[in-house]
Every structure is written in C-alpha cells, then in structure tokens.
Image (cartoon, helix red, strand yellow):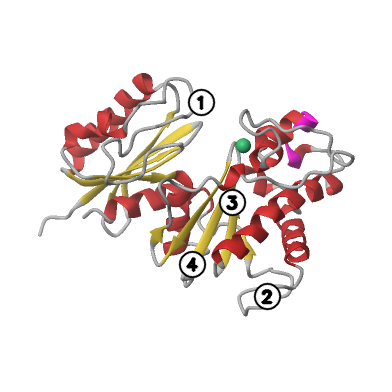
C-alpha cells in the first residue's frame, strides 16, 4: 500500500508551523510562516503544501491545531472557521479555504488541544488516562485529553478566562482582558505580565515575590483542573513557564489551594511528578497536529 502522508499545521498567534509527515510521525518537510492576515498567510500555506505534494506525493489528510476561538465541532457547517477572534482579519476565516484544493479530510482542533494530544501520546503525559495540558503564553488555555481524545462541550474549553481571586492590596493591576479585566489570562498571561511590570517575568530583577504572585493565579487554575477533571497529570507549558522557579512556586500554590482534600496516588507530596513541564518542549503543537491528521486516515 502506498504510504499515506499527513499535512499538519500548528497555527499560533505569532507563527504557523507547517509540516508534511509520514504516518509514523517522521517529518519530511517543515517550515514556518509569520501569522499575518489570512489573505497574506493562506497563500503561503497552500504554496508550501503544493511544493510538498510535488516532491513527496499526495496528502491523505490534514491536521490543524489552531489558535481560536474556532469552530471545532465536526458536525457544524462552520467546522474549522474562526468565530469571534479579535485578531485582525481572522474572524470568519476558515482553514478549508486554503486546504480544500488538496481534496483531503481536514481535522481541526485548538492549539492547546493539539499540544495536549501530542504530550499525551509522545511527551510528558505518556501513560496517563486523562491529561490536562495548559499553556501560559500570549494567551492561556487548557486542553484535556482522555484516552486520546480531547474533551469539549458545545465548544472548546476556555480555561484562560476563568475568574480568579485577586487581592487589590497586593496586586493593584486591574487586568487586561477586554471581556473580563482580571480573569486568569488578564492577570497572568505574558502580555499581562509585561503590562504590569514592563518586562517579562524572567527578566525582572527581583522576581521571587512576582513569580509567587503569578504562580498564585496559575495555582487557582491547576487546583480547579484537579477538582473538575481529576487528571492523572498536569502539564504546564508556554513561554511564561520558562521562568526559573515558576513551576516550583506553582506546585506549592496548587498544593496549598487543594488543602489536602483530594487524596490520590497521582498527587505526590510536593506535586513534583504531578505538575510537570512539557516533554516535547515547543514541538508539542506540531506533533499534536500530525496526530490529528492521522486520526482522519
Ligand atoms: Zn477573560
């Protein structure tokens, strides 16, 4: 049987990673394209895959792990279409517009769900039944994978926008979310940190108490993830999580917030095994996109 090839896209806020991969995950061609408006981006995306097809053969399926909000309901007529994203030009754009010419099935999920799937299958979530993957970067989001499938309701989860407790005496920053002000993303995303202190968390001169403040917000999400989903492990990735000391502070905050209420073998004392960094590093997203494409074969 001829080898089936997968086209994969990790569509992020600043760049798209495009890959052509074999079914076993081996990447045959890969490139990066800066995220601009769809009418600027999509032609470059299509062009990459046209050249990849010319060199390696036809594409059997596409997997797309994308920023959102985006319709990820396969039963919807707008499957793969961006909905309310504030990113200029993207509301209403649809991946099928640039991938349709290849005549292959297209599986679309969110970027965090894709990364969660990648970590579950090949990274720090291997062996877990239920894994929650959270990214803390330009935005905040969580994907929950159970037995190889990402969980969703009528739409994908929006964990970045949960309400968190903020003490204005300690943190007067009102938050930057245009919808909620001081929701989690409004307080603890990379841009929120830059707005509050003028630089990234890892570049601050005396970061310990600042790291603890951010960890306190992230810990509220982590504790809620435990209470809502009882995942076997929590993976925390994204640019902000590269801050030295942050994951240690996050473990402490989460354990404190849980207050010993949940007793399980998964929750090791100190949570060093429970809350971990991504095993695939920055490759989780494109790995997940390839797996999404594979699921359509
Ligand atoms: Zn919000």
Q: Nearer the viewer, mark 3 or mark 1?
A: 1
Q: CA distance from mark 2 to mark 4?
A: 16 Å
Judged left or right of residue 31, residue 240 is right
Which secondary structure, mark 4? strand
As drawn, the label of residue 237 is: 3
Judged left or right of residue 150, residue 187 is right
Which secondary structure, mark 2? loop
Placement of 263 over or under 85, stated as above or below: below
Which secondary structure, mark 1? loop
Which circle's residue, 3 or 1, is located before the other in the chain? 1
Disc 1 within 8 angstroms of ligand 1 (CB):
no
Q: Quadrant of residue 269?
A: bottom right
Q: Quadrant of residue 266?
A: bottom right
Q: Is residue 244 visible?
A: no
The crowd level at tag 3 (other Cα within 10 Å; few <14, some 14-19, many 20+) is many
Residue in the picture at 42% in, 50% down: 114
**Magenta highlight range:** 196-202
- Ligand 1 falls in which quarter? top right
Image location (x, y in percent) of residue 259: 77, 68
Residue in the picture at 69% in, 51% down: 218
Q: CA distance from mark 4 to mark 1?
A: 31 Å
Which circle's residue, 2 or 4, is located before the other in the chain? 4
Residue 201 falls inside the magenta stretch: yes
Image location (x, y in percent) of residue 216: 76, 52
Q: Which residue is mark 1?
A: 86
Which circle's residue, 3 or 4, is located before the other in the chain? 4
Q: Which residue is mark 2?
A: 268
């Amino acid at each position: 049987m001829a080898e089936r090839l997968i086209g994969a896209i990790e569509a992020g806020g600043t760049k798209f990673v495009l890959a052509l991969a074999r079914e076993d995950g081996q990447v045959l061609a890969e490139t990066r394209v800066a995220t601009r408006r769809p009418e600027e981006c999509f032609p470059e995306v299509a062009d990459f895959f046209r050249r990849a097809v010319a060199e390696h053969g036809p594409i059997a399926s596409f997997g797309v792990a994308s920023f959102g909000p985006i319709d990820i309901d396969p039963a919807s007529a707008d499957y793969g279409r961006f909905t309310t994203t504030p990113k200029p030009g993207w509301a209403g754009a649809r991946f099928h517009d640039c991938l349709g010419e290849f005549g292959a099935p297209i599986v679309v999920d969110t970027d965090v769900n894709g990364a969660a799937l990648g970590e579950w299958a090949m990274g720090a979530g291997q062996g877990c039944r239920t894994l929650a993957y959270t990214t803390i970067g330009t935005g905040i989001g969580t994907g929950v994978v159970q037995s190889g499938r990402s969980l969703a309701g009528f739409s994908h989860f929006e964990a970045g926008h949960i309400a968190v407790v903020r003490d204005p005496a300690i943190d007067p920053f009102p938050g930057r979310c245009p919808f909620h002000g001081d929701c989690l993303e409004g307080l603890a995303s990379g841009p929120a940190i830059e707005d509050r202190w003028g630089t990234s968390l890892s570049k601050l001169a005396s970061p310990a108490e600042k790291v603890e403040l951010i960890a306190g917000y992230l810990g509220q999400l982590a504790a809620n993830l435990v209470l809502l989903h009882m995942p076997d492990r929590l993976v925390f990735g994204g640019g902000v999580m590269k801050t030295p000391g942050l994951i240690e502070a996050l473990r402490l905050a989460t354990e404190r917030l849980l207050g010993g209420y949940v007793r399980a073998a998964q929750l090791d004392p100190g949570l060093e095994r429970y809350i971990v960094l991504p095993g695939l590093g920055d490759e989780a997203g494109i790995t997940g996109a390839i797996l999404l494409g594979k699921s359509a074969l």
